[in-house]
Each structure stands twice: as C-alpha cells, then as structure tokens.
Amino acid sequence: MEGTLIGRTFELADFCARVGATTKESNVLRQDLVRGLKDYYEALYGYDRYGAETIFMVPERMSQPYIFGFGCRRVLHDRRLSSATKVATANLALDMVLYGSDSGIPFAFFGILAFLAAAHRLSEQDLRYALVVSAGEAAPSRGLEKSEYLEFFRHLLHLESMPAVERLFWSHSLIARHQDGPGGAETINLVMSDERFLLEDRFELCAAWLRFRQPRLPVLLPPREGSFRGEFIAEHMPFWIAHSPSWPLPMMVRLGLVWLARLGADPMRLCEEYITYADSFSDQVRTAVAEIVAEHHAAMPSAGLEGVIEKGIAISGSSPIRRKFYHLGTTLFGPEYLERATSDSSNSVRQWAARQKLKHV
C-alpha cells in the first residue's frame, strides 16, 4: 500500500519482513541502511555528521521517502543480497512515494525504476504512475551515473505497450527537466533517432523547443482502472499534460535545430533563417548552424554556404563560435579564412589560428 511507512517510525524488523529478507540478509540490510543514511548526511553537510551514532537515526529518518532512497541505492548495489530482496526493496521505495510533498520522492528515483525495469518487474502502469508522481521534480537524473539514467530512458523509449506519442511526451518532460545532469544530449539523440516515433511528432518536438512552447502532441489518457495507481493516474496525469514544460534547456535548442536538418528539413533554408537569430540562446542557435554546415555542406549550394559562414564570423559575439566558422571556411573554401582569423579581435582565436598555421607548415 502506498505510503505505508510515511509518518511513523521506521522499524527494521518490519522492513526486513516486508521485503522477505533472511536472517543473514537482515544484517546486511541494516548495514546498507546505516551507510545510506551516512550518504545522506554526507550529501547534506559535507561530512559524516553523526559517525557511529548514525544507526540510532535510522528509525526516525528512514521513514522519509527521499532519505530512504539513499538506503535503497545501497541495497540495490549490494552483491550479498538476493535479487528478490532487492526487487522488494525497490518496490517498497515506489510504494513510499508521497506526491506533492517535500522530500516525497526517493533519492535516485529513476535508478530504482531502471533496476525494476532490468528485472522485468516494472509494469506499464507502475512506470506511468512513477512518471506522474515525479513530473514536478527537477533534475530527474540526480544521484545517478549516466549509464543508469540512460538505461531507464531506453526502457521508456522501448516500452511498446505504452503508446508512442505518450512515450514521446514523457521523454520531452524528462529532457526539459534534466538541467545539468549527465546524459542530456544522449537522451535527445536517442529520441530523435528512434524511428518508432512518427517523423511529424519528432519534427514537432524540435519546433516546440526552437519556439519556446509546449509540444503539440495528441496524448491520450489510458483507460481508467480501479486500483490506487490507476485512479491516481486518471486524476493527476491530465494536469501534467496541460502543464508540459515549455521553456527549453540550451542543449534542446541547439540539438532541436540540428535534428531538423537530420530529419529532412532543408539545411540551407535552416542556416539562412537562423544565422542572424538574435534572441535567447543565440549562441546555441549559431553553434547549431555551424554543426549543420559541417554535416550537410555537400548538399548545400556553394554561394549560399559561404554567405552563411561570412555571417557567422561577422555576427557571432562568441569567440569559440567564430572559431568554428573560421574552421569551416578554411576546410571548405581555403586558407584565406585561417589567415583572416589571425587578425580576429579575440586573442584566443588569433592563437588558435597561429597554431593551425604551424601545423600546415
């Protein structure tokens, strides 16, 4: 039952009984919970605040879902425990979620979901429930290694029992809340390269990111079920569909433009349209234009291509971006661009150009 450990003391014996631990495993679980609590205090204070006395804090603190996530993470990585005990602990973490509450989502929540998915113990409804209860959480990859988060993300993309447009919707939600966590660019590339999603829906995501708006995806609610999680989804999922993130991260803007060209939009038209872009994320947009030129120049007319490069050099206020366009000009049209770079206003660009000239002596 959801939230059964919330608001009362965490009893180790009850916990061990609930996850079906053996006597030997119970000792291991106690160690893992104490170490997980130490991890929490280390993250909070920067040091092991209570030392040997941490064990006395377990009954009070481990009933909180966020803190239990630290203990659960220790359990799931402990080779001394059986798969069944780990799965039961992960399921308990999902049961403990307290929607709308501070610290109501277990730490490293998506790592717990990835573990359940790898064990084939995460149903479509459980996944949807987890996505809804955590839809307001920033930085979903917090506390995870990049490989763990990407493992969860791939499971979401590959879950064909869930409608493709809904998987795309949740992918957008996770990407937009990613912040500076590991694997952000990889998740975008996974989504955009996945041909199980309609081409027009992937185009729509890219367009939404470039225009700072919600993507217009025809997401439907699943059939209503009588279970707690089914009713919860029916009640709360419409809110998160209506409040899908609309403000993109910088990487979403850059890769959104890059992927428009990869998905079939005219690269020359995109470059000419966006090279003079002067608004939020202008550096990301011009970086994307440089990437499009590098990838698609063979299919672009020479005169228009050189015009884009000239504007990139003239307009870009960022020296690393100007350097990209000087490099493209040198590669595609000859060494005169490298010579011009030696007179650029930026010392870093001049030094780069000097080094490049020495390589070709």
Image: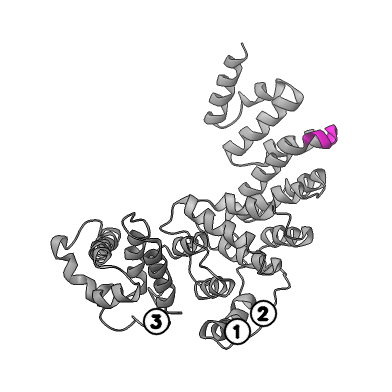
Q: Mark 2 near mark 1, Cβ–Cβ under 8 Å?
A: yes
Residue 4 within the magenta-colored segment of the rendering: no
Query: Which residue is at the front of the view, 176 or 279?
Result: 176
Q: Quadrant of residue 196?
A: bottom right
- Badge 1 or badge 3: first in the primary sequence: 3
- Badge 3 or badge 2: first in the primary sequence: 3
Q: Which residue is mark 2?
A: 221
**Amino acid tagged 2:** Leu
- CA separation in Å, label 1 and label 3: 19 Å
Q: Quadrant of residue 247?
A: bottom right
Residue 300 within the magenta-colored segment of the rendering: yes
What is the quadrant of the N terminus in the image?
A: bottom left
**Amino acid tagged 1:** Ala
Tell me the element at label 3: loop
Q: Is residue 16 visible?
A: yes
Crowd around label 3: few <14 · some 14–19 · many ≥20 (10 Å): some
Query: Which residue is at the front of the view, 35 or 302?
Result: 35
Q: What percent of the width, then of the height, locates residue 340?
A: 66, 24
Above or below, comparing residue 254 to residue 242 in the picture: above
- Badge 2 or badge 1: first in the primary sequence: 2
What is the quadrant of the C terminus in the image?
A: top right
Q: Is residue 247 visible?
A: no
**Amino acid tagged 3:** Gly
Disc assigned to residue 3: 3
Crowd around label 2: few <14 · some 14–19 · many ≥20 (10 Å): few
Q: Which residue is mark 1?
A: 234
Task: State the residue at coordinates (68%, 36%).
Answer: 313
Q: Is residue 111 left or right of residue 231?
A: left
Q: What percent of the width, then of the height, locates residue 63?
A: 30, 76
Q: Is residue 54 left or right of residue 257?
A: left
Task: State the residue at coordinates (48%, 63%).
Answer: 140
